[in-house]
Image: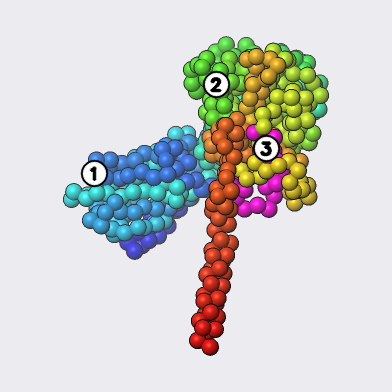
Amino acid sequence: MFVRVVSAAIFAWSVCVSGVQASSIQEAAPAEQLAAERVNTEERALADLDGRGDAFVLSTSQPAADIHFTLPPHVVSSEAWLRLAARPASDGTDGRIQVSVNGGDPIVIRPQARAMEARFALFSADFRPGENTLTISYATENAATGWIVDARRSRLRLTLEPVAPLSTLGELEQALGSDFAAPRRIALDTEAGRERITLESLVAQGLALRAGEVPLFSGDTANADLVVRIAEIARLDETDRAALRSETSQGPEIAFYNDGQPRLVVTGRNIDEATAAARLMGARSFAGHGATFLAADAIRADRLGRPSIEVDASLTETADLRTFAASGLPFSADQGARTAVQFSTRFDSDRYGALSVLARAALIGGEAWLYAWYGDAEEEAPANHNLLLVGPNSTQFEVIDHNAPDELRAALRAAERSRGQRGLMRLAAAAYADEGDGETATTREGAELGVGVASLFQDRRNAGRWIGTLTAPDIASFESAGRQLARSNLWSALEGRAAVWSARGVTPLDFTVQPPTLFERVQELAVDHTRDAAFLLFGAALLLLLRGAMRRRKASA
């Protein structure tokens, strides 16, 4: 095919050119600074970069599509490939497709009028740190209908090489928001204490708002792309203290340095100042700032994030899970000023799952919950605040147990019985079953399940107070369930008063409708077990044929 012949020559030339460029820049950088830097190869779907959907049209009326993406500072592209999947809008489609980067020389292909998937090299020298634009255009001399590009199957693959390490908070913020080679594995290095939940929650939300997605939070400092040290100055080691602006503390401070592994330090002279520094992390942008950031610098710093919607009183009065998933309301109102966030996590892994969920809520609302109350299971949440309880086994809390709707209890039963079942329709069927039916699965295999339950309801004893919970049963891993919900489209599918989520999808529960009839249960079983139903029907048909043959034989005898 013409594309493959041309692409081979283009690839050889582009690698040669980019290799010369990369080597000339790298010679200028100190070798010891780049020793720990890694070459990063990453592939992203155009749909994830563009955000306009899973497909777009190229035609005479829409001749070009621009896909915008960002790269971290101090990198060069040594190799770039595009896999373009498209199909003709009609049998009469002709013309040519051109692909260019940042207005550079285009790659031209002339595909035949049939579905194609072409893979070819791009000019790697055209890529640059910061904003980039991939342009896919269509041209024809005839009145042809054009092409439909599958943006989900079309993928851009880049190999990026660092030419210098990140050195400032502004560069770190730019790297976090990049579409390729961004620091996504983030280790939170904190000690247990009364403000640990507050510190980590504020920092996690600030990182997510900068990244535009939920990072992978953990405590694994050895394998992290970025380590965030959150502590009072007295608890910092000498290397961390040396990164501060002055040996004499000046109050809340955020500092960044890179000694082979990027490290962010959030600190203060006491725990209150450290909390203030974490709040600065969620409130102000680091764009244009150096290696340190003090409270005084917040005056001239830009605000981090913007509210995604205007708060409507009617939304907070009639909220459900769909409202929460779309806006964070009622908890996100006034940056969480009337919200208490309580973690029911016993293990570090569960806490990282809870932080992922909270970071996604901040992303949806467009800003961090700076003024929310944060605490763990051992603390008593303010009774005059809306309550969001995150973590496993939330029904063990008295406030949840006394106010939980039937949908929440049914959803938890459904989640407990989901181990080994192949469809979420079975979750709904289990929800309507009696509590005494069957046994609860509590094996180690079940503990690895990423299944969770969400619910939103009003406090029966405190008018106007909302209670929400994002939880999981004993058999499930809340770390897996929380990450799964926070980092996928499952979040936007939440609705109703309660819902069960897993990798298979979301099942909302609403007892305002009638429970399923026997016929509906049979239909549900047939859909969930299509192959089994086919075997049963085949077996029944075979038995009827044999029975008819035996009757005919008896009649003839």
What residue appears at the point 34 percent right and 40 percent down from the top-left corner?
Answer: 65
Where residue 222 appears, x then y in whole percent? 73, 41
Residue bearing the label numbered 2:
318
Q: Amino acid at mark 3?
A: Ala
Which mark is on residue 173? none
Q: Residues within 10 Å of mark 2 (few under 14, many from 20)?
A: few
Local SS, label 1: loop
| Residue 152 appears left or right of 163 | left
What residue appears at the point 55 percent right and 48 percent down from the top-left corner?
Answer: 520
Alpha carbons under labels 2 and 1: distance apart: 47 Å
Alpha carbons under labels 3 and 2: distance apart: 22 Å
Alpha carbons under labels 3 and 1: distance apart: 54 Å
Where residue 251 appears, x then y in whole percent? 71, 13
Asked if 154 appears above or below 493 in the picture, the reply is: below
What residue appears at the point 62 percent right and 53 percent down from the top-left corner?
Answer: 422
Q: Which residues are magenta?
A: 407-426
Local SS, label 3: helix
Q: Which sits earlier in the primary sequence, circle 3 or circle 1? A: 1
Question: Residue pushed farthest bottom?
Answer: 557
Residue bearing the label numbered 3:
410
Q: Which sits earlier in the primary sequence, circle 2 or circle 1? A: 1
Q: Residues within 10 Å of mark 3 (few under 14, many from 20)?
A: many
Tell me whether the residue at label 2 lies in contact with that at label 1, contact meaning CB atoms closer than 8 angstroms.
no
Residue bearing the label numbered 1:
60
Asked if 416 appears above or below 173 in the picture, the reply is: below
Q: Amino acid at mark 2?
A: Thr
Local SS, label 2: loop
